[in-house]
Structure formats: structure tokens, C-alpha cells
Amino acid sequence: MPTLNWIGKEKVINHHLDVPYRVLDRKYSFDENGQHKEDNVSENKIIRGDNLEALKALLPQYEGKVKCIYIDPPYNTGEEKWIYNDNVNDYKLKKWLGEVVGKEGEDLSRHDKWLCMMYPRLKLLHKLLDKINGVIFISIDENEFANLKLICNEIFGSNKHIATIAWQKRYSRENREAIGDAHEYILIYAMDKKQFKENRHLVPMNEKQAKVYKNSNNDPKGRWRPIPMTAQAGHATKDQFYPIVAPKGEIHYPPEGRCWSMMEDTFNELLSQGRIYFGKNENSQPNVIRYLSEVDGVVPWTWWPHEEVGHTDGAKKEIYSILGKKVAFDTPKPVTLIMRIIQMITDKNDIILDSFAGTGTTAHAVLNINKADEGNRKFILVEMEDYVESITAERVKRIINGSSDFEGTGGSFSFYDLGEPLLTENQNLNENISVDKIREYIYFMETKAILPRNNEKYYLDTYNNTAYYFFYEKDKVTTLNYEFLKTIKVTAENYVIYSDICSLSEDELLKYHITFKKIPRDIARL
């Protein structure tokens, strides 16, 4: 498979492993009672901070659990003023830090910087996706489309590429360029192609598509259309070849190489229900009548026109109507575009992640859909820019509450900052981190599961017949000895016990089926 090389690639392929694990520090929650310090235990999150570190922070709770990811990263147009700031330990890459990425021709390393920025983020997003049902959607334009597709093929697998959507972002012609720029792309990769096809929902039919359904005969069941009643004969049975007599006497057989699409018994049943159409002359080849009321939607195409999913001009007006005209974004995404994505692939309890959150359109789309179908989809937004509170979170608050111009959706979220690293530079436990956060991390690294809440001081939980203990005190050295063993009340086949030191011999550990892990030496790193 062709791969892409660029300056710094060898330094960023595994950079996601070097990113420090930081805890999430909840600042406030928001719901029908407004903004407050109390934790409302909302599963919706808005996180302020660098998305590379934020994605790492999400792993203990969400690795392999996210159904749908949508991201709208910088397109690297030269107009976005983005800065490469990843702390990669390489002198060549460090020279890029703090500098605005320039335009084509002015900055000869601009594509290298973009690829170095995107690669580790895509690696972490890949870890967060549900390993069977997960799907990622990535918006991009011509500037980095080819590069993005190659690195996605490398990270997700070229056989996981589902389609590339062309979204018509403009509805009016512009004459400034040699050829008008009217569309962008959305790359789609799924963890399992077969599962994607089974999970994918039909998209709503618009009136243009519904025009083929008519009711010239005033059928009380409403508008309908004729569907040809033949199929390829390759796998047909003998029961799919039979004569059909039209009302006016014409006898019909399947055309050469084709068969009827149903058995004769099924045909006779539909005929008795008035569901077979023989044309206006009542003598033509039979068709099955399909009513518009029976159609749930249509299979999505790779062409998404603005009439169906909106355009950038409408998206700007959308933001103005919610936050006022002082909020200026050049190319926001319309909420209807993100709703199309979410409706196409998610069910009522799925998790949707957007790590380039911008104005919060993804949360808006999730809340709209939840209100429409009484769902409980959860959103996770990550945004590092200063406007994350004044625009991103503020938009979500207003959508939840509503206004005189629009009805609120209801809902809730909690707002987080990235906290301190769990481990210090010398790889000791950071004593500023709460013990609860450390316990959650330890348990996840052992089991890849979320730690259940309990009132035990050292006991974590039992998983696959192994009981886990984290014998840790911030202000004293802990010792795994017989005195501690006497405090263990849980019966299990095996035990994993963390402590600072161990006074038990290898034979004693073996006798009691104990695996000793030294703090901090044996704490696994994400």
C-alpha cells in the first residue's frame, strides 16, 4: 500500500504514546437549573485544552466506546493562522513551535507541519472508536485532501474507507477564481465495513426526491410509485418463472435473463390487495405499487447538495441568530450537515465526539436529534481556543434553554479543563491529583474497564476473577505484608496488589496467588 513520507514523520508516528496523561478537572455543570458548581453527572462534556492531550485524557473512560467521530480540522489554507505547538522531542520540529503556519510558497514546510499535527491525533481518535461499530467523518478541502486520505489509509486501513462525500457548501456562483470553489469533502472510515452497512440508517427524503410519488388515481392510501417487478435471474428458483395475465388479457413473462422478483404466491397476495400496477392501459408488464408512506428514507449518496444539508452562508446566519453578529467565523458548518451525519450512523444511546469543536455545531446537532426522537446520545467536545466558553459553551447553553426566536432542546453538560499530569517528570505520582482519579486510572490500565464506585479505601474491584487493590497513601510508605493481607475480605482466584514496597517472599506471593506491583514503577503508561 502506498504510504506518505514527510519531514518529522518518524518523530510523530508514536508521539501519542509520549503525550502525558492529564486528568479532567470539572469546572462547572449546566442544566435546567442554569450553571452551578455541583456535579450534575452529565455524560455530555465540553473540554477546554489542546485536543491531543484531551484525547489522551478521555482514554480511561472512552477507549473503544465512541460510535461516531466528526472532526473539522484546520484546512491549512494559509488564512487560518494556526500554530504547530506539539512538544515533540526533536530539534527540527521544535523550531516550528509558536510560529503561525504560512501560505503556499511562503512556508515550504506547511504541509509537513499539518501532517505532524494530524497524525498523532488521528492515532488517538482511532483508539477511541468502537472497534466494531465506530465511524469517523473528517471534513477537508483540496489543500490537504490527498495527504489526509493517505494517512487515514495508513492509520485506519485503506479497506476501511467507506466513501468520500462531496458537500456543496455554496449555493451562489462567485467569479473571483478561475474555477469557483463550491464544495468540500467529508472522508468516511468505518472500523467494520459490513457493520457500517448494517448500522447505516436511511436519510430523510426531500420533496424533490418524493416527486416521483404521485396519486393520479386518488388512491386513499396516498401517493405512490410503480416499482419494476423483475430481478437478475442468476440465483432465481423455478418458482420465480410463471405467466402473469394483465387485466386486459396480455400475458407477461420475465424478460430474457431476468426473473420475477417474488414467488407466485406472494404476487397473488399483492394482486388481491391492489398492489400490482399494469400501467394506464391495464395491459403492460406488472409493477409493484410502493406508497410514499411506506418509505423510511433513501440511501445516502456521495453528493450532498446544499438544499439537503445546508451551506456556509446559512451556518453563519445560524450562529448570528443564536449568539449575535459579533461572532465571526468564516466557514462554519451548518447544523443540518452534522445532523445528517449523526442521523445516518447513530442510535439513541451512542457517543459522538468532536475534537475540533469550533462553535459547538456538533453538540447543537446532537441536542436537536435527541429532542426529535427522545434519544440519549452523548456529545464530547474539545476546543483549545479562547472562545471555548464565550462561544462554544455559550451556544450550547442557549440551545438548551431556547429563546424568543427558537425553542430550547433541553439537556445538560459539564465543562472541564485539562488538569495536571498524573505522573511527574521523574515518573512519580503527582500528589496534587486526587486519589480517586489515580484509582480510576490504575483500574482502567489493568482491565480496560471503568472503575465502579465503592466505599473501600484500597480495594478497587474484582474483574475476571482477579481482585485489584491499590494500597497507596500520599504521606507515608505502604507495605504489602501479612498485616495488610489480614484486611483483605474479598475472595478471588487471583490478586493484583499495588504498594510502595513488599515484604512477602516470592513463595508467599505464589502461595496466595498475588501479583505485587510497585508504586510508581509498575504503573502502566497510556
Image: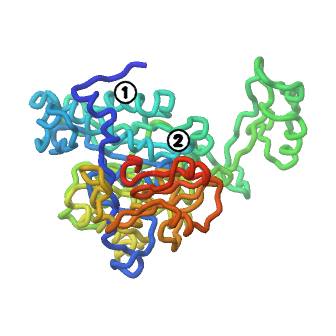
Whole-percent x and y of residue 17? 34, 41
> Going by the image, does 329 lie left or right of 53?
left
* Residue at x 33% of width, y 35% of height: 14
Whole-percent x and y of residue 432? 28, 65
The colour scheme of the drawn protein is rainbow
Q: Nearer the viewer, residue 510 or 274?
A: 510
- Numbered badge on residue 337: none
Name the residue carrying label 2.
300
Secondary structure of residue under mark 2: loop
Q: What amino acid does circle 1 point to?
A: Leu
Name the residue carrying label 1.
150
* Residue at x 45% of width, y 38% of height: 188
Q: Is residue 17 visible?
A: yes
Q: What amino acid does circle 2 point to?
A: Pro
**Which mark is first along the chain, 1 or 2?**
1
Whole-percent x and y of residue 272? 88, 47
* Residue at x 40% of width, y 50% of height: 523
Image quarter of residue 84:
top left
**In the figure, 513 relative to 396: above or below?**
above
